[in-house]
Amino acid sequence: MSDFPRINPMGERGILIEFQPEISEKLLEKLLFYKNKIEDFYAEVNVEVISTYNSLLISYMFSIENLYSEISALEQLFGKAKIGKINNRQIFYLPVCYDEEFGWDLDLISREKKLSKERIIELHSQAVYTVYFIGFLPGFLYLGGLDENLQISRKSQPRAAIEKGAVGIGENQTGIYPKSSPGGWQILGNCPVPLFDKNSDPPCEVSAGDKVKFFSVSREEFKEISTQVSKGKFQLKKENYEG
Amino acid sequence: MRAEVEVLLPGLFSTIQDFGRRGYQRYGVPLSGVMDRIALKTANLILQNQADAAVMEITQMGPKLKFNAATKIAISGAFLSPKLNDREIENNTVIKISEDDILSFGKPVCGIRAYLAIANGFKTDKVLGSRSWYADLTKVDRLEKKMKLPYEASKAEKYETYAAIKFDKTYLNSEEIEVFPGPEFRALPETLKSHLRQSSFSIDQKSNRMAIQLTEVLGNQLDPIITGPVLPGTVQLTPGGKLIVLMRDCQTTGGYPRVLQLSERGINMMAQKKTGDRIKFLFKI
C-alpha cells in the first residue's frame, strides 16, 4: 500500500495533500485531476485549491469547522477517483529576444557549456516546457523540461536588479522574471510579453498543466511587440495542446 | 465635494487593507489583507460596517490625517496614543469626526499595529477583488504625504445609539503564540522538536508584512523540500537555521521546510509583536 496521498491539516484554514516527493508529468496530471475533483466537491464552499509539484493545498476563507469529517470526505474522494486525462490544456508561444542586449550571460553559458550561442538559443527555444504551477511572484511560471545541456548553476553573487521579462536559467529550471527584482539566474534573453495583467480576470492566461514554447525574435521584432503590448494590441499565440 | 482623508504626515508605515485577495493564489498572488484580523473585525463592528470594509493599518508611528467631511471612525488593535485635534481619544469606541478634524498618533503603548476604520470603509481602488495595498498590484504600497483617501461622508444620526464593544486586549501582550506542527515537523530531530516546544524566541528587526524573522539560530537543519504551498502563519526553517514566520503578504509557495503553522489567533498575535519582543510557541496538538 502506498503511503500517499497524505492528507493533513495545515493550521486552521488549510488542508495539505501530499504525494510522493517527485517532479514528473505523470504526477502533475494526477494532481490536476484531483484538483478538479476537489473543486467540484467544494463547488458551493469558499475554498481555493493550489497545486505545486507534489502537493495540493485546500485554502479555506475561514477556519474549518469539522476538520476530521472534512479529511475523511477527502479520503473517500481519493479512494473512488479513477485518474483521467487533463482536458483543455493549451500551448503558449512566447517571443524571446536572445540578442546580446538582453542575453547578459550567453557568453558565460557558451564558455561553460561549450556550446555556440546559436546552439544555446536553438536548445532553449525548441523545447516544449510544462507549466507545473505558478508561484513565487504573481505570474511566475515554474517550468519543467529544460534541456540537460543547458543546465547551469546560479550565480554565486546574485545580481541586484534583473529586468522585467528577463529569461533565465537556474539549475534545471528556466523561467521569466515577471518584474524587475534581484536574482541569481543566468540570463539569456528577454520576453516582451507580460504574463500577468492585474486588470484582467483571471490575471494570467496560463494555468498549471499548460505548455510553453519560446521562439526567437530580433531586436526590431522585440521593439515592435513591446509597442503592441503597451497599446494593448498584442495577441499572444496559443493553441489547444493534445499531448 | 468628495469626502477625503488627506495625509499631512505619513508616519512610519501605513497601508489600506481589507480581508485580502481570494482566488488568485494559483497565479502567485499573495493573500494580503490586515495583519491582525481581530482588530479589523472589532473596528468595523463598532461602526456597524461590513466585516471586510477597508481600514487603515498603522504601524508603530502613526500618520497625521485631516478629514474634509463629517464621518465616524473607530480605532482598534494596538494603542498608539491617538489624538483628535490635540485631545486624547480612546481605542474601541465610536469617534465623531467633523470637517477639518485632525487625527494624529503618539507613543506606541501596547502592540504595534493599530486599525483605523471609517464609516462604510475607505473607498480606494479595488484590484483583483480587494483594496489591500501590495507593491506591483496597487498604485501605491504605503501612505505618503499629500495622498488623499476617499470615503463616504455620513450623517451622524445612524450612530446616536450604540453599544460599547468589549475588546479583549490580552492577545496584544501575550507571549504564547498558538501553533500546530507543520508538514515537515515530524522530520525534525527530537532535540529540535523539544527546543521549539520549550524555548522562547525573539522578534528580529528584519520583519515586515511578508514575514517576521526570529533572531535565534537553531543548531539543526533539514534538507530543502520540493517547492510546495505555504500560507500566512507558516513557520519556515531556513538553511541558515533561522525561523521565519510568514505573514499576510507572503509568497504562495516556498522551498524551506515548514516546521510549524500558527493558528489564526497566533497570526493575529504575531502581528502585534515588535523587534525584541519574546514569544513562546504553545502547541495546540
Image: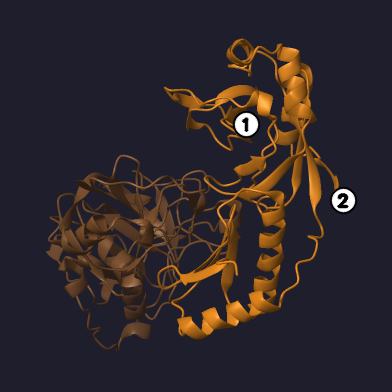
Judge from the rendering whether residue B95 lies leftward or rightward of residue B118; answer left or right: left
Measured Cα–Cα span from mark 1 to mark 2: 28 Å
* Host chain of mark 1: A
| Rendered view: B151 above or below A195 | below
The residue carrying mark 1 is A165
Instruction: Name the residue nearer the viewer: A5 or A48.
Output: A5
Which chain is displayed in brown in the rendered image? B
Which residue occupies 51% across, 53% down? B228
Rendered-image quadrant of the C terminus of chain B: bottom left
Task: Please state the horizontal and vertical placement of residue B184, each as a whole percent of the image.
Answer: 40, 58
| Kind of element beneath mark 2 | loop
Which residue occupies 77% across, 25% down? A224
Q: Quadrant of residue A94?
A: top right
The residue carrying mark 2 is A242
| Rendered view: B218 above or below A36 | above
Judge from the rendering whether residue B214 lies leftward or rightward of residue A205; answer left or right: left
| Rendered view: A62 above or below A121 | below
Q: In which quarter of the image is residue B192?
A: bottom left
- The circle on residue A119 is none
Instruction: Name the residue nearer the viewer: A45 or B189.
Output: B189
Which residue occupies 71% across, 11% down? A116
Amino acid type of the residue tagged 1 in the rendering? Gly
Colour displayed for chain A in the image of the structure: orange
Task: Please state the horizontal and vertical placement of residue A107, each as a whole percent of the image.
Answer: 61, 11
Task: Please state the horizontal and vertical placement of residue A166, each as a whole percent of the image.
Answer: 61, 28
Visible in this render: residue B80? Answer: no
